[in-house]
Image (spheres, helix red, strand yellow):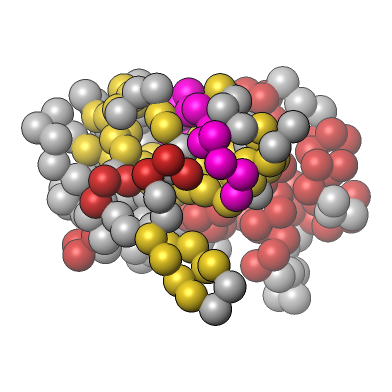
Amino acid sequence: MATKELSAYILQRIRQLGLTKTQVIERSKLSRQAFYNILNDRILEETKLSTFITLAHALEVHPLILMRQYFHGWELPVWSSKDTKYPKDHSGFVRDVTYPDNSLVTVNQEFEKIWEIQNLGEVIWENRRLVCIDEELVIIQRRGEEWRPLSQTALLVPLQREVPIPMTHPKQTVIVAVTFRASPIPGTTVSYWKMVDAQGALCFPNLSGVMCLVKVVAV
């Protein structure tokens, strides 16, 4: 295990975000002792996986990035061949920048959903796009004791069916935004999106992609 690489990466990420160590501690809700144990190469055996997850969230990176720094030199998998089109390519969801799951929007409201994702593999993302795959899905909703397909009028309407993904190098995070119009009918609704390459082929066909899940309410 190489905690020096981990602490160096954490300090680098703090500088990139323009944060102070105190702000990272407050974001992660770790104790000062736990945080400085990591920075000073004193990660204890009882350190929990949740520590890495909360710290990764505070640093706005995927937890696997921190784990790779910690286990530098170990054989950690960076991809799954069944889930990727390109060898050593992998993607990770970091956070919902706006409108996290179950956020409230009003009927017919236009709003911008922003996701942050991270390149967890070893392949540069170039000429890639995020595309809506709602038409490929049958979304059902419970009505009393029955489950029925969600009416097209009750679906979210993206104002773009696809958006470009900026060039993203390994370990980098990227922001992707889509503008939606909420349905005229109150209820919970969702829209799913996946990454494709320059030829329009799915990069991660077996991964779930990202989604926008909101509750539409009447004014």
For residue 106, say whether it is visible.
yes
Residue 157 image point, x, y percent? 42, 32
Q: Answer with the quarter of the image where residue 108 lies.
A: top right
Question: In this orientation, which residue lies closer to the viewer: 34 or 215?
Answer: 215
Q: Is residue 195 magenta?
A: no
**Place of residue 170 in the rendered image (x, y in percent of width and height, measured from the top left):** 36, 37
Is 56 situated left or right of 193 in this image?
Answer: right
Q: Percent from the top left, x then y, of residue 56?
A: 64, 48
Q: Position of residue 22 (x, y in %)?
A: 88, 35
Residue bounds of the magenta highlight: 171-187
How many numbered circles are shown? 0
Residue at point 74%, 47% (across, down): 39
Q: Quadrant of the N terminus?
A: bottom right
Quadrant into which the C terminus falls: top right
Q: Is residue 41 above or below residue 191?
A: below
The residue sitting at 14% across, 29% down in the picture is 198
Is residue 193 shown above or below 112? below
Q: Is residue 112 left or right of residue 100?
A: left
Please report the residue visible at 90 percent of the width from the left and 50 percent of the height from the top.
32
Residue positioned 71% across, 70% down in the render: 48
Residue ranking furthest to the bottom? 145
- The outermost residue toward the left is 199
Residue 30 figure quarter: bottom right
Residue 122 showing in the rendered view: no
Q: Find residue 127 and report its image quarter.
A: top left
Report whether 156 appears left or right of 50. left
Above or below for 110 versus 130: above
Closer to the camera in the image, 2 or 120: 120
